[in-house]
Amino acid sequence: MFEVKDIGDGVIFNIKVQPRAAKNEVAGLIGDALKLRITAPPVDGAANDAVIKFFADFFRVPKKGVTIVSGLTSRQKTIQVVGITSEEVKSKLRL
């Protein structure tokens, strides 16, 4: 079950990244994580940078407000977004 946790001035949630996809998009849920397709390859941090840019644009927050808390070298990642609430995330994702 996908869960978005409110923490301090933002939220934290899990994602599963599919690099080298045809386009950048949220592709639904997979287990307890949000599935995210990213066009960037998983080389030299390119996919991580693309994940940060995607969520900054998606939630309309500065890039410095999006942090990969864990999973820098894994497809499973924990993301922190500052400046939004869990309700805003669920509304934006239509969950």
Image (cartoon, rainbow, N blue to C red):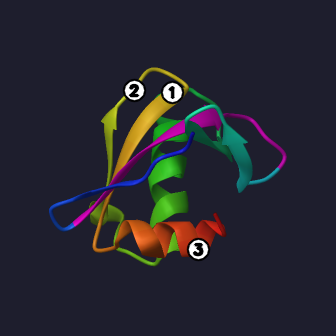
Spot occupied by residue 29 in the image (x, y as percentages of width and height): 68, 43
In the image, what residue occupies the spot 54% across and 67% down? Answer: 90
Determine which residue is flagged by label 3: 92
Determine which residue is flagged by label 1: 76
Spot occupied by residue 82 in the image (x, y as percentages of width and height): 27, 65
Q: Is residue 80 left or right of residue 38?
A: left
Q: In which quarter of the image is the N terminus?
A: top right
Q: Residue furthest front?
A: 1
Q: Which of marks 3 and 1 is nearer the N terminus?
A: 1
Nearer mark to the viewer, of 3 and 2 = 3
Q: Is residue 52 magenta?
A: no
Q: Is mark 1 on a helix, strand or loop?
A: strand
Q: How far apart are marks 1 and 2 (CA)?
A: 6 Å
Q: Which of marks 3 and 2 is nearer the N terminus?
A: 2
Residue type at the position of mark 3: Lys
One can see residue 39 in this view = no
Spot occupied by residue 20 in the image (x, y as percentages of width and height): 74, 35
Nearest the viewer among 34 and 46 is: 34
Determine which residue is flagged by label 2: 71
Q: Does the magenta stretch include residue 20?
A: yes
Task: Note whether 84 is above or below 20 in the view shown.
Answer: below
Spot occupied by residue 70 in the image (x, y as percentages of width and height): 32, 30
Which picture quadrant has residue 6? bottom left
Label 1: few (<14), some (14–19) or many (≥20) C-alpha neighbours in 10 Å = some
Q: Is the magenta stretch mostly helix, strand or loop?
A: strand
In the image, what residue occupies the spot 43% across and 21% down? Answer: 73
Nearest the viewer among 43 and 86 is: 86
Task: Note whether 54 is above or below 42 in the view shown.
Answer: below
Question: In the rendered structure, which segment of residues is drawn in magenta?
Answer: 10-22
Q: Is mark 3 on a helix, strand or loop?
A: helix
Q: Residue furthest right?
A: 22
